[in-house]
Image (cartoon, rainbow, N blue to C red):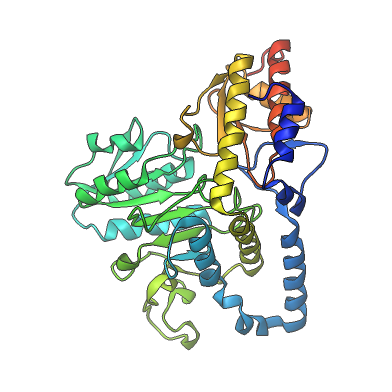
Amino acid sequence: MTDSREDAAALDRGDPLSAFRDRFVIDPDVVYLDGNSLGCLPRATVARLEGLVAQWGERGVRGWDEGWLELPVSVGDRLGEAVLGAAPGQVVVGDSTTVCFYKLVCAALDARPGRSQIVTDLDNFPTDRYVLEGVAKARGLRLVWLDGDPETVTTVIGPDTALVTFSHVSYLSARIADMARVNSIVEDAGALMLWDLSHSAGSVPVSLDGDDAPLAVGCTYKYLNAGPGAPAYMYVRRELQAELRQPIWGWLGRRDPFEMAPGYEAATGMRGFLSGTPPVLALAAVDEGVRLVAEAGIDAIRAKGIALTECAIALADEFGIRVASPRDPARRGAHVALSHPDARALCARLIERGVIPDYRRPDVIRFGFSPLTTRFVDVWDGMVALRELIATGAPPGSG
């Protein structure tokens, strides 16, 4: 139990990951509890980008032959090994999460012709829901909404199901889905499973290969600290790569792009899931974020994430604040959802006090704890500030 700020400071002194905080650019005047939306800037990224800009200036177009074109695959392999539990040759980095998700949705549906149903849940991340709505409308398919945890997918899946897609860690509640169990259910139904790992990668262990996941996407700007708008990644299980064809046929997804030949012939392996020119500067930022996570170790990161969220939940209980995240740490990611009818106003007032959370409709305050940058005193300060603001009441007409 953390009974005082000094107790929290003592936990920080004993934290094996405490030294990593100094390797990030962090405003000393704020308590940053929004790393689950946008991670902090690694100092190594600043130096890496400065070097790349200099290379651009000195080498110009020659840089493409000096490693730039290999970045989507090489960074993808490092990400797969350090964060996703994926062997080399199954992950590439490029495009936004929305575009990557669209690519794999279309590829999966094309691989299951004659099936008319897509399944997702009501609490899935908005961009995933919107993409699915658009694809279903364009193809004349039926989108089935699961009102429950992913493990209850057995209630809606059937022989008409082509694709099932959920978030591994819920963006709202931080609930962790049982990936292996859901994969087995979906495979037994003959459908394909697509995971969104945006709130998982870099915060909780993932074993895509070990859990027999067919497909996955995710962003890199949260717990991987790759920066605003950083490119996302795609995972396609090795044995599916020859079967699936993504729908955005760009020149770098062709087997011999520099031939400039007529007609599209997809490259083999994960290169066939690429489309346009790789964002070199952004890929370098992804690489630095992945390297930090690899150095710290995902198991140590997970252990601290559990400790931080347990601390926040204990304080919420003591302060009389309702917790909307799972109580079982094994089923909870690295953020905590706190429920209050004046959540919107409280978030605004916290930011005025230098505590940075975020608000999610209808009544959720999310405190995101990024284990490489968040201290236990940050948890204490954030929770105490929230208690004090609740005690004083929200401004009239707010919320």
Q: Looking at the rendering, which quadrant does residue 37 occupy?
A: top right
Q: Which residue corresponds to the image point at 62% horizontal and 16% vertical from the top-left?
A: 318
Is 134 above or below relative to 329?
A: below
Is 300 above or below relative to 96?
A: above
Residue at far bottom of view: 259
Q: Which residue corresponds to the image point at 23% horizontal and 57% vertical from the top-left?
A: 112
Horizontal side of 63 relative to 278 (left or right) equals: right
Q: Quarter of the image for the C terminus: give it.
A: top right
Residue at far right of view: 29
Horizontal side of 201 relative to 8 (left or right) equals: left
Instruction: Please provide percent x and percent y for residue 148.
Output: 34, 30
Residue 377 seen in this snapshot:
no
Instruction: Please provide percent x and percent y for residue 21.
Output: 73, 48
Query: How many numbered tags mark residues here?
Result: 0
Q: Nearer the viewer, residue 104 or 172?
A: 172
Q: Quarter of the image for the N terminus: give it.
A: top right
Horizontal side of 46 relative to 310 (left or right) equals: right
Is 354 above or below relative to 140?
A: above
Q: Nearer the viewer, residue 234 or 311?
A: 311
Q: Looking at the rendering, which quadrant does residue 391 occupy?
A: top right
Residue 370 seen in this snapshot:
yes
Instruction: Please provide percent x and percent y for residue 18.
Output: 71, 46
Q: Looking at the rendering, which quadrant does residue 355 occupy?
A: top right
Instruction: Please provide percent x and percent y for residue 340.
Output: 58, 18
Q: Which residue corresponds to the image point at 19% horizontal and 43% vertical from the top-left?
A: 158
